[in-house]
Amino acid sequence: MQQAIGVFDSGVGGLTVAREIMRQLPYESLVYFGDTARVPYGSKSKDTVIRYSKQIVRFLMTKNVKAIVVACNTASALALDELQDEFDIPIIGVIKPGAVAAAEATVSKNVGVIATEATVKSGSYNLCLRELDPQITVVSKACPLFVPLVEEGLLEDRITDDVIQRYLHELKDYQVDSLILGCTHYPLLRNAIGRYMGEEVNLINPAYETAKALKTLLEEKDILNRDVKTPALYAFFVSDGVDNFIKFADRVLPVDVKMTSLVNIESY
Ligand code: DGL
């Protein structure tokens, strides 16, 4: 099926998910929406994140998408159930795929989760992990400064290393053997986080796991694009700050972002 897949996030971070989908499903077209006017979601209430997410799904449905990926961890944690209840289209989030991979990887059964404040407060990763394996204990930590550090491009920097040390020493003391990078931006700090945690700790990237889960979903629903001759099309939409979005996208994506359009998301 040639219709595109809708992917949305609170802003630019979800491009880490779009990137994994482009790599793992190169024949699938994407319509990406980044809510750059209303970012961050990580410090907002559940009701607000649900309202924003529903508006975005309504917008994506006008693009005739065949499935939707909630690339934002916060929106997945706070709004996925409501979206799945309200809309008649396959919708997946990033929490379950990340949790499944962590549950498979952990031996010590001590799993760490780093995410936004709202994701940590929601307890969604904990719930999912403990449903998968009740023996797992979870230690979570909100790491709000990681988002601006990544957006400033400070992926390898002394300041970032200091912040990593400040946030993650508890998880190190707790001897987690698997750590879920539970926010869209964190996979871009993978090298620096890995250096600090040590190579014996498995870093779980929900973006990668979600692209894998998406492939399974498209196969199950029999809506995978079988036309491998026509190149995939990528369309980008944001609610503000087109230039900044393109700058970030050019750093993250394997393709050039030629066109990004502005959307008045409040009208959906
Ligand atoms: N995209 C968000 C997430 O993955 C991080 C940025 C925000 O707080 O909106 O949770």
Image (cartoon, helix red, strand yellow):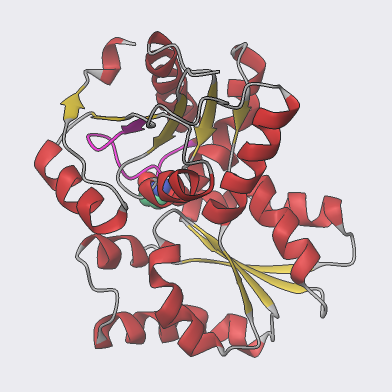
Picture quadrant where residue 222 is located: top right
Instruction: Residue 67: say if magenta.
Output: no
In the image, what residue occupies the spot 10% across and 42% down? 243
Q: Is residue 25 visible?
A: yes
Type of secondary structure dominating the magenta stretch: loop
The quadrant in which the C terminus is found is top left
201 relative to 236 in the view: left or right:
right
Picture quadrant where residue 176 is located: bottom right
Foreground residue among 164 and 207:
207
In the image, what residue occupies the spot 41% across and 52% down? 16
Q: Looking at this rendering, what residue extends furthest in the left direction?
A: 243
What x and y, as percent, mark residue 139? Answer: 67, 70
Magenta part of the chain? 31-45
Q: Looking at this rendering, what residue extends furthest in the front direction?
A: 229
The tally of labels here is 0
In the image, what residue occupies the spot 43% across and 64% down? 186
Q: Is residue 124 visible?
A: no
Q: In the rendered view, tell whether residue 20 sits above or below residue 261.
A: below
261 relative to 126 in the view: left or right:
left
Instruction: Residue 34: say if magenta.
Output: yes
What x and y, as percent, mark residue 240? Answer: 17, 33
139 relative to 38 in the view: left or right:
right
What x and y, as percent, mark residue 46? Answer: 51, 34
Q: In the rendered view, tell whether residue 41 sits above or below residue 236.
A: below
In the image, what residue occupies the spot 28% across and 35% down? 38
Picture quadrant where residue 166 is located: bottom left
Q: In the rendered view, tell whether residue 235 sits above or below residue 159.
A: above
25 relative to 100 in the view: left or right:
left
What x and y, as percent, mark residue 1? Answer: 56, 18
